[in-house]
Amino acid sequence: MRDRLAEAIKRSSADYTEIRIEKRQSTSVQYRGRNLESAGANTDTGGIVRCLVKSGGWGVSTFNKLEDLEKHLEFAHECARSLTRESIELAEAAPVVDDTTVQLEEDFREIPLAQKKELISSYNDILLSHSDLIRDTMCVYADRFVDYYCANSEGTYIHEERPHILCRVAAIARKNGNVQSTGESVGKQRGFEAVRDMTQTAHTVARRALDLLSAETVKGGKYTVVCNPNLAGVFIHEAFGHLSEADHLYENPKARELMVLGKEFGKPLLNVIDDGSVPGLRGSHKYDDEGVPTRKNYLIREGKLVGRLHSRETAHKMGEELTGNARAITYRFAPIVRMTNTAIEVGDTSFEDMISDIKLGVYACDSRGGQTMLENFTFTSGYAYMIRDGKVAEMVKDVVLGGNLFDTLVSIDAIGNDFKWLETADGCGKGGQMPLPVSMGSPHIRIQDVIMGGK
């Protein structure tokens, strides 16, 4: 493959040429209620050419037959020449030559589809067996193995094996018009062993859906809120991480005003990172989709904004260092600036100490989605509990947290000593590219004066 790509690139007369090739093998199984909705396997090979003419722009062409590569190189170059826009420059990146293979403990490519179906069916049966009040379920299994190639006109050639596996179990409970849903998932760059033992997870999901039926709706107001690592990780990814993506910043004057390096965003205990180099996480690879090595990037350090995430183009435009954050979901898309694994770093407060002096508060857990618009956000927790006199008390539901991002960051006054990465099946969406594998991480965090919707 290396010789094939190198020979094609030599024939390109663009200022910069880049080729990515992917060979994908995947299987999936999905149950809905008692019905098997789908089960199948797929193979897919394709690639993308990007050509840059500095006085013109980017030209892009995708293909599914390697024998058509030269034709698509010409087409991408022609597209780039036809554009008239500001000059585009790329930050310098040292050429990389690397070949990375993986050894899976239990290679999912060798597991029969029937065995995968049997496993997911067993999780689905657990959900349905808990109660007649469990009216619907969703159980999903998916895996894929990608042989990934990236080469460019500066001498980079990368081959990387990229495995992904995920499993999601969800339950919907209904009683007298009251409908509650909950779910959990696992997503990893590992083998079949990663999803083989989710029996307890299925039991937990079913019980939680039933418990939510009898939970009271939280009373609206202003509370001290403790977020579990799941919700805290989703919060920092959605509300802050996207604001750190430099293509969004560069194109949005309002965002640039908000995100000034050196600005104080929180107390000195707050540190936020994005790190695509952590082995095995869903958002991790040795290199991004421009062949730039991934690394640990501090976004907030000791409460101050110190960094943002870049592609080669945005790094040059803003005069900042490369971060390894140009990513695409498949060969069908050009890379854009994306997060990898985004997290609040570990603190030094135990969970018990964090809640001990809270007279009346809320312990909010997991996430059922939310909305962000620049610095404003709302998030709905998956489930929650009241905190009364320093103790976790009764379960409550319909907990919606909202506010201004920067006010909220400043209001974080305790960070837990129990950091964990959330290895879920969740993906990130941006620019029509969804779902991009990412991971989020955090310990427990405590936030003062959170405005909460409710009854």
Image (cartoon, rainbow, N blue to C red):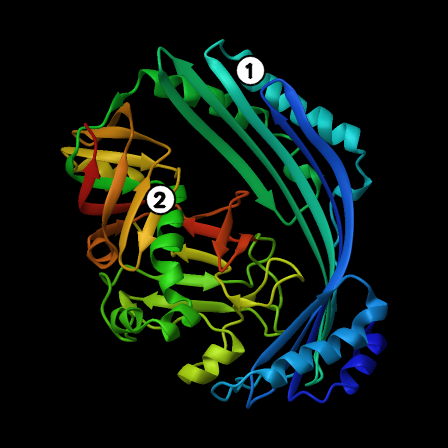
Q: Looking at the picture, how far across and down is residue 202, in whole percent?
A: 54, 24
Task: Name the element at disc 1.
Answer: helix
Which residue is at 19% across, 53% downward?
Answer: 411
Q: Amino acid at mark 2?
A: Gly
Q: Residue at x 49, y 73 (%)?
A: 323
Quadrant position of the C terminus in the picture? top left
- The amino acid type found where label 1 is placed reads Leu
Measuring from the top left, give residue 72's x and y in whole percent: 75, 74
Pointer 2 residue = 370
Give the crowd class for mark 2: few <14, some 14-19, many >=20 residues within 10 Å. some
* Image location of residue 365, percent across then percent down: 35, 36
What's the mark number on residue 128? 1
Q: Horizontal placement of 308 versus 142: left or right?
A: left
Where, quadrant-wise, is the N terminus in this rendering?
Answer: bottom right
Position of 73 relative to 62 (above/below): below
**Mark 1 or mark 2, earlier in chain:** 1
- Determine the CA span between mark 1 and mark 2: 28 Å
Q: Residue drawn at (60%, 87%), measured in percent from left and top?
A: 53
Judge whether 136 appears above or below 3 on screen.
above
Left or right of 68? Residue 237 is left
**Residue 441 rendering spot, x and y as whole percentages:** 43, 50
